[in-house]
Amino acid sequence: MLVGFDKAELCMKNLMESLDSLLCAEGSESLKSLCLKLLLCLVTVTDNISQNTILEYVMINSIFEAILQILSSPLSRREHGYDAVVLLALLVNYRKYESVNPYIVKLSIVDDEATLNGMGLVIAQALSEYNRQYKDKEEEHQSGFFSALTNMVGSMFIADADEKISVQTNEAILLALYEAVHLNRNFITVLAQSHPEMGLMTTPTSPIPTTPVTPLGTTPPSSDVISSAELPLDADVQTSNLLITFLKYSSIVMQDTKDEHRLHSGKLCLIILTCIAEDQYANAFLHDDNMNFRVNLHRMPMRHRKKAADKNLPCRPLVCAVLDLMVEFIVTHMMKEFPMDLYVRCIQIVHKLLCYQKKCRVRLHYTWRELWSALINLLKFLMSNETVLLAKHNIFTLALMVVNLFNMFITYGDTFLPTPSSYDELYYEIIRMHQNFDNLYSMVLRISTNAGQWKEPASKVTHALVNIRAIINHFNPKIESYAAVNHISQLSEDQVLEVVRSNYDTLTLKLQDGLDQYERYSEQHKEAAFFKELVRSISINVRKNLAFNTLSQELLLKEFSTIS
């Protein structure tokens, strides 16, 4: 309106071209910073980014190459990388389902290593800074009077204690990571790149404006954070990479899903892991025996388990850390406000990893028992809260997925479990916990014989239990007769395993189809509403916290007085 509708197009074209040339030129860093802030202002004018018609001009007059240039140069990346990455993440989400968005097309074909690594570094830095802030707060928290009190009184205060350790989540950076992983196959290689830069560039080369202390996620991490060593606190200082930093971040964010921002962050973390678990190349390095890492995930304080000592972490392929994260989530979120959607994603990720292991015959040395035990406890939880949960969720979909994970181990376990004895242990766990499977069978049988909305999903679980029931019904009588013949009231694990090994040959199992098939992730059909809401909240947050105060007025006036 100010420039007149007849001149708007030309005026915006001139503005975009000026911004583009200022961002690409060798010149004032403060001026570049203001250019990016102006662009972020334009992008976040409306809460719903797709209703912002100003962005049509940003689509026509692309600044994509300028953003890439910032990310590929170490100096400009250190100064402006954060703003550039957030800007790109927002631009990619403009009318992404309604029209051809040039930023999506261009981001999907970037193959320049320096640029992709630069983007990875900016994301890793922001996530590391979050992890560091959380760790600092946690240590401060544990060393205080409060922790002594908590230990004394027991777990009465654990929930309150947790709430105090809250650092604001950073969905904008997560969205950038998601778009890179989802759209660009070449970015997958960046996940495993170790980051020497984090430890090397400790002295910035130009004077740095000071950043006021604000919660992370609202303003970029200050430049001195970006240039200093990432992980002096960590045991794995030599061998960190973006994926490890992301897994640690996920382990913190996924602890508490009661808060809406954390729930969104947790969901986005699981969506990113879903994309990674489906990617052939990502799976190759996740399972690579020559790439072993110590990944120190955060574990939720719980009454019935001791806090694990970080010092004894073994070096293992990265897929073990992903599985640990999934097991940790399964164990810690069985509550009345049940996050069904997150559980489904969690089980799907485990399933996709198993499909890769089966296909490529990867024998992973992992403590599978922990996963089996977590899955059985999940089934137990679903059964004991049947009435409450069925009022809100179709629990049979989840139960079917869990039972089919066991079917996957039973049918194909000999191709990917590390040793024959791990296959025996699987049978031992099923027999030991047979009561849970029996109860599940009774429950689904009861529901599938009554006419009602759950009849069909429950009957699918009934059919899926056929092999588990065959194992229980075959081995239990053999174990009982062994005990009777040898006059033993309580058999040891070794004795049960001996019975199992000597009775495999008479066991008959049915071959089940489709256990190693899965539906691939699709954003547009399943997740469009989630991303629309997420981008809205990021847009509001970015607009609210555009940090012009990071640039001191005095410095600006001094510097701009000399710009011709």
Image (cartoon, rainbow, N blue to C red):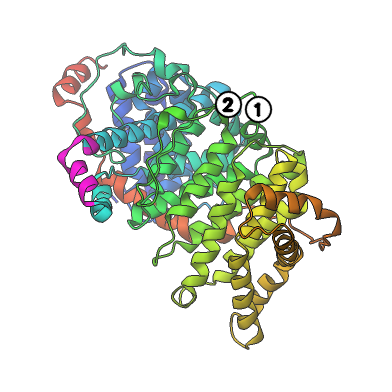
Furthest-right residue in this view: 505
Amino acid under disc 1: Asp
Q: Secondary structure at mark 2?
A: strand
* Distance of label 1 from label 2 (alpha carbons): 6 Å
Of 67 and 480, the residue lying toward us: 480
Up-down: is 443 above or below 46?
below
Percent of width and height locating residue 263: 39, 54
Q: Seen in the image, is 127 located left or right of residue 545?
A: right
Residue extent of the magenta highlight: 141-153
Q: Secondary structure at mark 1?
A: loop
Find out whether the residues at labels 1 and 2 contact each other: C-beta distance under 8 Å. Answer: yes
Up-down: is 373 above or below 194?
below
Which residue corresponds to mark 2?
292
Of 290 and 192, the residue lying toward us: 290
- Going 21% across and 51% down the picture, which residue do you hit? 153
Percent of width and height locating residue 474: 77, 64
Which residue corresponds to mark 1?
289
Q: Seen in the image, is 201 located left or right of residue 322?
A: left
Percent of width and height locating residue 348: 60, 54
